[in-house]
Image (spheres, rainbow, N blue to C red):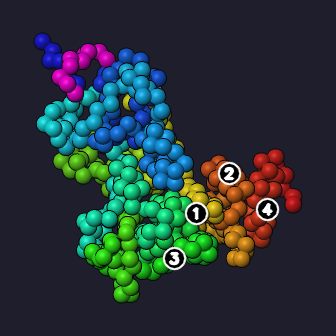
Amino acid sequence: MKSCKCGLNGVKLSMVDPHHVIIGAGPAGVTAAETLRKHDANARITIIGEEPEAPYSRMAIPYLLEGDIQEAGTHLRTDAEHFNSLDINVSRERVGTVMAGQKRLKLENGNDVEFDKLLIATGSSPIKPPIDGMDLPGVHNCWTLADARKINDLAVSGSNVVLLGAGFIGSIILEALASKGVNLTVVEMGDRMVPRMLDETAGNMLKSWCEERGIRILTSTKVTEVVEATGGLHVVTDGGERLPAKLFVVAAGVKPNYGFLASSGIEVGSGVHVDNHMQTNVPGIYAAGDVAEARDLSTGGYDVLAIQPVAVEHGYTAAMNMAGHPTEHRGSLNMNVLDTVGLISSSFGSWMGVDGGTRGTLADQSGYRYIRLEFDDDRLVGGQAVGLTENIGIMRGLIQTGLPLGSWKDKLIAAPERLAEAYIATAHGISHA
């Protein structure tokens, strides 16, 4: 006699219809669940998300802080009955252990969940720097809706706010805090803003832009401790300065959530290793989104690209393969577009260049305009821009398609601003200027 398989509440499952379980209720997990339902009408689909919220987008939180949207506007799907209508079960639990060989999850509440196919889409969590005072009242990350509620209470107009980190996420938070009229100081240990996205010219251009708008930016600076003070906190720097703060927001980077896989046999590195079908080393178990170490289109290697469009792409690809429709992941493009108090900056692909490559640059410091193009032979492989939004789509398209530029490469090295002209010409086979 065959034993039955049971779901979250001990409900008997059909031995014919598979049970797809997704750990993570972010963009990767939600996209995967919807894709599975579209391609497998009879499967049982369960999303397990640990937060007591409807599935939402973390990237929408800054818009919530700015007052552009309400909390419902952060939700990935606005219809409260959306998942019920698709017969997708959303459970708010935390997974403690994955028993890959048994195709079973152990939840922290003690219950077991059996699966036929599993997707790990657990995303990432904020890094907590080893700084004394990080547990004091008034110290917050900006990562969850619960964080946003606390920040909204403290970040009132005219109050002193210190932000740790001017990376990509930090700069998004900077935009939201600045819109609230606070006295904002940003502390960044790198020598420029957004050092993993922009070079020295672009990063320092962004710094000057912020400073002109009343935001104090301290680069090449570390926070050594946080101490209680009258009316709030003092954030102490390695230069000995004590920065008063009613609110101290920490945006010091993130790390993938894969600690619960320690005894599972699933291989991890900087993230969960996956192949070109988003499958891990364990057949039937997949990973997607910020937790996955997947193919990088620019380098051909494998890396964690923690951006929402990549998470959606991963979730779709993994789900197609879970549903039995072989779908190859060619690789995701490393891409970032940032609006910092009105100045748009962007970077794509191998923006720092490749060995043996060539580049073209154009900078207008006073006009806050900059473009840098990176070439490998006659193909554009990376680029960045500040204040030149008209080039964003073209830059991305040329890098993603690998279109040979021929003689236009040398023209672009001499005059990077001709990017649109080069794209149109090469797309139509025109080689002359």
Q: Nearer the viewer, mark 2 or mark 4?
A: 2
Total label count? 4
Front: mark 1 or 4: 1
* Mark 3 or 2: the one toward you: 3
Q: Residue 212, located in which quarter of the rendered image?
A: bottom right
Give neighbour class at mark 4: few <14, some 14-19, many 20+ (Cα, 10 Å): some
Q: Which residue is mark 4?
A: 418
Sequence-wise, the earlier of marks 3 and 4 is 3
Residue 253's disc number: none
Secondary structure found at label 2: helix
Q: Measure how far apart labels 1 and 4 are at the Cα level.
A: 25 Å
Range covered by the magenta-colored residues: 8-17
Q: Which residue in the protein does label 1 denote? A: 340
Please state the horizontal and vertical placement of residue 261, each as a whole percent of the image: 23, 47
Q: Amino acid at mark 1?
A: Thr
Q: Nearer the viewer, residue 373 or 385?
A: 385
Label 3 crowding class (10 Å Cα cut-off): few <14, some 14-19, many 20+? some
Which is nearer the N-term, disc 2 or disc 1?
A: 1
Residue at 80% x, 50% y: name it.
Answer: 424
Q: Are marks 1 and 3 in contact (CB under 8 Å)?
A: no
Position of residue 121 measured from the top left corner of the image (x, y, whole percent):
36, 42
Local SS, label 3 = strand
Give the Cα separation between the discs numbered 1 and 3.
Answer: 14 Å
Mark 1 vs 4, N-terminal side: 1
**Quick check: marks 2 and 1 in contact, CB under 8 Å?**
no
Type of the residue with mark 2: Gly
Rounded to the nearest angstrom, the CA distance separating label 3 from label 2 is: 32 Å
Residue at numbered disc 3 = 216
Q: Which residue carries the number 2 mark?
A: 393
